[in-house]
Amino acid sequence: MSKERPNTALEALRRPGLPVSAWPWRSIGYLLTTLPSAVAAFATLGVPWLVLAVRLAQGRARAGEVAVLVLIGVSLAAVPGPLAAAWLSGRELRRLRTVDARPVQARFRSGRRLRSRYTDPLAWREVGYVLLLATVSPVLVLAVMAIALMAVTFAASPIILGAQGAGAGPVTLVFGKVDSVVGTAPYAAAGAALLLLLPYLATALAGAHAAVARALLTGGASERLRAELVEVSRSRTRLADAFEAERRRIERDLHDGAQQRLVGFTLKLGLARLDLPPDSSAAALVDEAHGEAKQLMAELRELIHGIRPQILTDLGLPAALGELADRSTVPVVVEADVPERLPALVENTVYFVVAEALTNAAKHSRATCVTVTARVKGGALDVEVRDDGHGGADPDRGSGLTGLADRVAVTGGRMLMSSPAGGPTVLRVEVPCDPSPSSE
């Protein structure tokens, strides 16, 4: 048997020594404090149903009256129900700590506006819990209280009858009458047994109530997983934004710092070469250094261009895709229908996905033609790269496809690829986007 302390009443129910632990008292306290919540829930949503039940029990309910009461009850649940349930569910989650020591996860909500209370599935689960709280919970709690009162009465019946003295007449004990102390023996035994079982009964009922409350008010494991996934998605977006900001800083430092200093250095070498005799060894060395400086400047410019092409920053994705097509060694046809600027992260991601796809087509597929299409449809940017090569692209062979899929996933999009043997190879990217006036 595990030595760890139980976290819930249901876990405590399976441990030895329950009657002498604090769990039965905590469970009784939880059940007793359920009654005020049940009264509040009943006053909010249950009155029409009680009136209907009474009228039906009396046999005096007419069809029109039943329809009106049902309509009022449904209207109360549908209109003020989600609003009232928000307050009651918050109180119930605080009470839950009495018999459930596990932390309550933050409840995921689709929004904070009033309209979200009527569209959020969790709000309607809260309404369902409030209806159970108004109808089922008080019945069960009162039943346990009645059993407890009966157990105490049975167990104390010999004392009660003995205190009355001889000739006082029979005493009614629920199921019958007794007129002597000896006759109370079966009742006293039953009362003692009920008192021994009462801690288990109260703990079981409180544990079941708490389990239902946790499942409906927090959504259980699925709701917690959903909240965690949302937080992971948000943190992934924050990381992507941070990387994008850092990339811009590096690009700016290279462009405004190292590149400008290298340009100045190259100019100085060119001037120094003019001042030296053409046939001297020093002139040859300066001329060689000048050529290397120019080559280094070209490589640095290419590096900056690889971080984020200037044309992508200035003119947007369609122009940048056109430049990729012009630089490709394979003929490329670009069909871009992107009327507005997209977020910088989306443009940057799609640009490098297309660049990698064109590089793979030129190096590995022996394609003779590549078609690139980009369209914004339904709040998402769909990009397709199709080549007529021999196909057979495999992410496990180091073609960079896995890295591309990871890069697309950061934006919340997905990448699909079809590359059967013999071709063609089709790579499709779907990225959610909100057009913005500027990519920066």
Image (cartoon, rainbow, N blue to C red):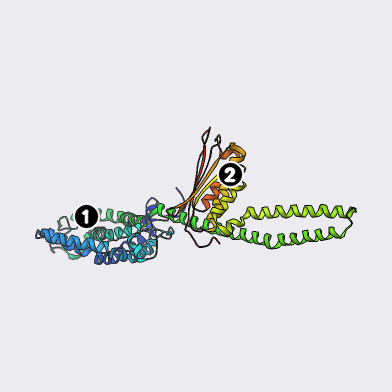
In what element is the residue under mark 2? helix
Asked if 391 appears above or below 301 in the picture, the reply is: above
- The tag earlier along the polypeptide, 2 or 1, is 1
Q: CA distance from mark 2 to mark 1?
A: 90 Å
Where residue 300 sits: x, y (%)? 70, 54
User: Residue 418, image x and y in percent?
Assistant: 50, 39
For disc 2, the neighbor class at 10 Å (few under 14, some 14 to 19, many from 20) is many
Q: Is residue 90 visible?
A: yes
Q: Residue 256 falls in which quadrant of the image?
A: bottom right
Foreground: disc 2 or disc 1: 2
Residue shown at 61% from the left, 55% from the top? 309
Amino acid type of the residue that numbered disc 2 sits on in the rendered structure: Leu
Q: Is residue 416 above or below residue 200?
A: above
User: How far from the left and from the top, in percent, is residue 122?
Assistant: 35, 58
Residue identified by numbered label 2: 358
Residue shown at 64% from the left, 59% from the top: 251
Q: Amino acid at mark 1?
A: Tyr
Is residue 170 among what the camera can see?
A: no
Residue neighbourhood size for the residue with mark 1, other residues' Cα within 10 Å, grouped as few (<14), some (14–19), many (≥20):
many
Q: Is residue 428 left or right of residue 305?
A: left
Q: Which residue is mark 1?
A: 187
Indicate the position of residue 270 as horizontal and vertical percent values.
80, 58
Q: Quadrant of the C terminus?
A: bottom right
Q: Residue at x 27, y 67 (%)?
A: 40
Nearer to the camera, 288 or 43: 288
